[in-house]
Image (cartoon, grey):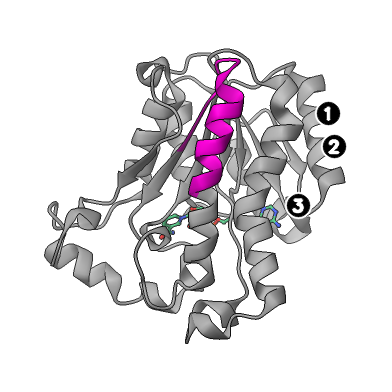
Amino acid sequence: MLLQGKKALILGLANNKSIAYGIAHAFKEQGARLAFNYVGDAIKKRVEPLSEELGGEFTFQCDVTDDAQIQAAADLVKEKWGGVDILVHSVAFANREDLSGRFLDTSRAGFHLALDISAYSLTGICRAFEPLLHDGSSVLTMTYHGSTKVIPGYNIMGVAKAALEASVRYLSYDLGEKGVRVNALSAGPIKTLAASAVSGLKNIFTRVEEHAPLRRNVTTADVGGAAVFLASELSHGVTGEVIYVDSGFSQLGI
Ligand code: NAD
């Protein structure tokens, strides 16, 4: 029970295929207390039964593009829990038309939207939740290898993930002063709602199976296991890192 009694706030659960679901499941098995956000009524209807299944204590609306909603979430969590031990940011979005074709054709508005939701939101959330974080708290976000290498079709999301990973390093510096750690997990491709929008990911699953050192794709449970490590005291000395959970695919030079 590596997370016994720890209060874990999970942003980004959409359905039972979500990486956030795998993380929440692994956290629950290690004794964590859970709460989840949702965005809008359609996702609320899917999140509430999943929260119940996972023993979540409460759910709340929080669209990360809206500072007022982020602050309201922080106020609610303060009232319910007083503090947060683990904060998971598993949120990303880009317009579908910006996830195929040429990166060169990304519009200014599409760029802003993807960077706002997928990168800036981590900083906005960390700032609003800073008073609830304490020595030993762990913040986790989700990234992908398209941040450092070209994955055709990943396009604007690769640029957003590069900004997200740099944000992890700067946030780890700012929050490290009070003992709060900030890390990212770089997951290999997993079939989720968000991934289905990325044209470039369609062929990559077989490539991973054929060529990755482990010869298989990763699962949300694999990501959940690494998330338990980063959320627990086992990783007390680890911050500002991007840890790959990708069957070793990113290590290939061919
Ligand atoms: P998902 O669709 O299950 O989760 C994405 C979540 O982002 C959803 O819950 C959605 O509601 C949320 N979201 C979108 N816009 C939002 C907004 N404005 N405010 C608040 N929440 C918002 O897909 P997923 O694959 O589990 O994605 C989770 C994270 O993992 C993302 O950051 C994604 O980029 C990252 N990731 C995914 C893969 C993959 O192959 N699936 C690989 C590496 C990293």
Marks 3 and 1, the one that precedes in the sequence? 3
For label 3, the SS is loop
Q: How many other residues sit within 10 Å of disc 2, few (<14), some (14-19) or many (≥20)?
A: some
Where residue 96 sits: x, y (%)? 58, 78
Q: Which of 151 and 86 is in front in this view?
A: 151
- How would you classify the magenta stretch by its main secondary structure? helix
Numbered label attached to residue 75: 1
Q: Is mark 3 within 8 Å of ligand 1?
A: yes
Type of amino acid at the residue the image marks with label 1: Asp
- Residue placed most toward the observer, 2 or 231: 231
Residue 43: give x, y in percent of width and height.
69, 56
Amino acid at circle 2:
Ala
Q: Is residue 180 magenta?
A: yes
Query: Tag on residue 119?
Result: none
Callout 1: 10 Å neighbours few (<14), some, many (20+)?
A: some
Numbered circle sitting on residue 63: 3
Residue closer to the observer: 57 or 250 = 250
Q: At 46% across and 29% down in the image, what residue appears?
A: 27
Q: Can residue 143 be seen in this view?
A: yes
204 sits to left or right of 61: left
Circles 2, 1 touching at the beta carbon (< 8 Å) = yes
Q: State left or right for residue 236 relative to residue 5.
A: left
Q: Quadrant of the C terminus?
A: bottom left
| Residue under pointer 2 | 72
- Residue 233: quadrant of the picture: top left
Which residue is at 65% across, 21% downward?
133
- The answer to whether residue 195 is magenta is no
* Figure quarter occupied by ligand 1: bottom right
| Residue at 81%, 51% in the rendered image | 66
In the image, which residues are magenta?
Answer: 165-183
C-alpha distance separating marks 3 and 1: 15 Å
Q: What element carries label 2?
A: helix
